[in-house]
Image (cartoon, rainbow, N blue to C red):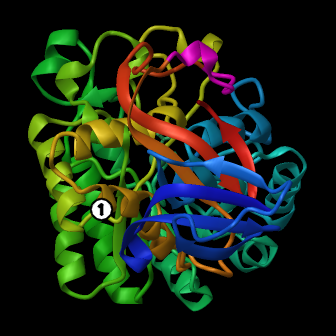
Amino acid sequence: MLLIKNGRVIDPASKTDANLDVLLDGEKIKEVAPAGKIAAPHGMEVFDASGLIVAPGFIDLHVHLREPGQESSETIETGTRAAARGGFTAVCCMPNTKPVNDNASVTRFILDRAKAGGSVRVWPIGAASVGSKGEAIAEIAAMKEAGIVAVSDDGKPIATAKLARQVMDYCRSLDLPVIEHSEDVSLAAGAVMREGVTSTRLGLRGMPAAAESVCVARDVQLAELTGARLHVAHLSAKASLEQVRWAKSRGLRVCCEVTPHHFTLIDEDVQYDSKFKMNPPLAAREDREALLAGLADGTVDAIATDHAPHEPALKDVEFDRAPFGILGFETALALALEQLVQSGRLSLMRMVELFTAGPARVLGIERKIAAGQPGDLTIFSANHSWTYHVKESPSKSRNSPFDGRAFKGGPTATVVAGRVVHRSH
Ligand code: DOR
Ligand code: ZN
């Protein structure tokens, strides 16, 4: 048994914000009571959470763990250790591994590895098409049987409207969300950052915002046609957000996520350094403003990191030649506190919702701090000063633009299935 004593429990699902004790027994929450009400029997493990916030376990809807196939960049073991350090208790891993997770045996392999060496829960996402090649639909039903929680061809969009329609039709009947990496590849061809004054100044090929929003518009129309659950991944453009807002106003089952790097940085921050290269690229100032408004007003459902490790040998090359992607786990909460809460834009309750009840809703599950619920908790500080040093990360990769950044507030401890899997201070 583990008693988390005297923390400020913030639980959006039950609209709780109070000083409480949380008792965990085995893998589950056993009791929640006003602070001081649960007596700790001799020998019980006690965690004093005075001055800290206790939230439901954070869920990351969008991560790349690189296993199988690219273990020199990350493994399920190293990636989930980094996730635990970032306060995440469950991560949904994208299928763009080698081989692609497009069949039940790869799904089972990932789940076996996670069980053997994972620090947090791993929920695989299956490919929408065979090899994510955009030609034939993947064996989605068999993968669902094996344990996938959604489908996506992430790294790329589902190649054609015809195939996207077919995938949505199929996933509607299986009640699985379709997660789209929204990109019109003809508009994005050859581009390595957002098109604008900065791309011109740096001499780098840019893609317009429409490279994303054209695909979001396509998929919103198809979600209406099919009745499918559509989730727009790493939404970065104002025009895309407007599509999602319109879809929601029509009552469509459309939702979206935003990454910490897109609500923190803009194209003007891009330096000729591949740590600023990711897809979708850092957007314009007005896009960031729109994302912040969407995070506040409820249009955005979740914060997801798009944790995309690439080993130094691959990433430390010219901007043009480097792969897209940056690390995300360990800076996500601190960036959210800084950009969303300390800036006065969002309440702490709303920020926590974007890491917990929001992503849970996207997956069609419920997560709250109540007796009988899984014993997953994220314990964090809203004001403790610390500096992120990427060299200290358990990740195998080092591709973060936030190395050396000082923060106020961040993860303190991560509890998964009743066990403390990470504790920082
Ligand atoms: O930045 C990105 N990295 N965007 C993607 O769509 C794929 C991802 C990766 O797999 O590295
Ligand atoms: Zn993507």
Q: Residue 148 is drawn in which quadrant?
A: bottom right
Q: Residue at x 20, y 86 (%)?
A: 250
Residue 234 visible? The answer is yes
Quadrant containing the C terminus in the rendered view: top right
Q: Is residue 118 left or right of residue 344?
A: right
Q: Is 292 situated above or below 387?
A: below
Q: Residue at x 57, y 86 (%)?
A: 175
Q: Residue 356, position in %: x, y?
A: 47, 63
Q: Residue 193, position in %: x, y?
A: 29, 28
What range is drawn magenta here?
Answer: 389-397
113 and 163: which is toward the camera: 113
Q: Residue at x 24, y 39 (%)?
A: 339
Q: Residue at x 50, y 66 (%)?
A: 20
Density class for disc 1 (Cα within 10 Å; few <14, some 14-19, many ≥20) is many
114 and 348: which is toward the camera: 348
Q: Is residue 202 left or right of residue 65?
A: left
Q: Is 129 situated above or below 76?
A: below
Residue 133 visible? The answer is no
Q: Residue 200, position in %: x, y?
A: 15, 17
- The residue carrying mark 1 is 350
